[in-house]
Amino acid sequence: MRIHGWNLLKIGTTVCSLQYFGTRFLTTVTASTGNKMASDWKNAQSVYDFTVKDITGNDVSLEKYKGHVLLVVNIASLCGLTATNYKELVELDEKYRESHGLRILAFPCNQFNGQEPGTADDIVCFAKKQNAHFDLFEKVNVNGDDASPLWKYLKHKQGGTFGDFIKWNFTKFIVDKEGQPVERHSPTTEPHKLASHLEKYF
């Protein structure tokens, strides 16, 4: 089924509206890292070398984001940080998407106390209730041997204070217009505090 702009996304028995940009073809959601550099992420030159899967299971080459500043974040629906982060991520998206080309790439992750247990349709519907129109991707692991290669790359390029591993939900990476990870911010850094950081790269 061909989809343009705002569309109705049906997964299972639930129908939700979510904004996608460009043309997509809906397919069955598959459990996969969805990455063409699964065994070679250390040799990636930028995030543009990666292909990931969106929330509907479609392959998305990150080359589509060339020329955009990116904010990449691991999200969860049941975390104590969820309300603030969703609210302020939506505000950043609304403030900078059209005016400065910001793209927020949100990756659901269930590795932290099982706080993103839902299916793809659950995640889509939750995001819609938060008025979130940023880009949603397939649920991934961000730590461990089976972590998404993109996230292995992000951690490799921007290590954390006490180690490269992701500490909790809502860790945030800023990627510049050349596809280079340039900043990493902790789960407790509220998104509105990133505005001045993002503006350096617009």
Image (spheres, helix red, strand yellow):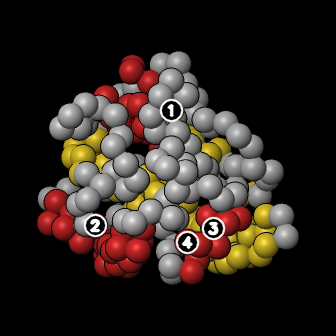
Name the amino acid, label 4.
Ala
Camera-side residue of 92 and 49: 92
Q: Contact, CB < 8 Å: mark 3 with mark 4?
A: yes
Give the labeled residue for mark 1: 147
Give the labeled residue for mark 3: 124
Identity of the residue drawn at 33% across and 43% down: 167
- Marker disc for residue 191: 2
Tell me which corner region of the image, top left, top right, bottom left or bottom right, holds residue 69.
Answer: bottom left
Give the labeled residue for mark 4: 127
Camera-side residue of 139 and 103: 139
Other-residue count near label 1 (Cα within 10 Å), few / some / many at <14 / 14–19 / ≥20: some
Identity of the residue drawn at 83% across and 64% down: 12
Which mark is first along the chain, 4 or 1?
4
* Spatial CA span between label 1 and label 4: 23 Å
Left or right? Give the position of 114 relative to 55: left
Q: Which secondary structure lies at badge 4?
A: helix
Residue 170 image position (x, y, % from top left): 37, 56
Tell me which corner region of the image, top left, top right, bottom left or bottom right, holds residue 103.
Answer: bottom left
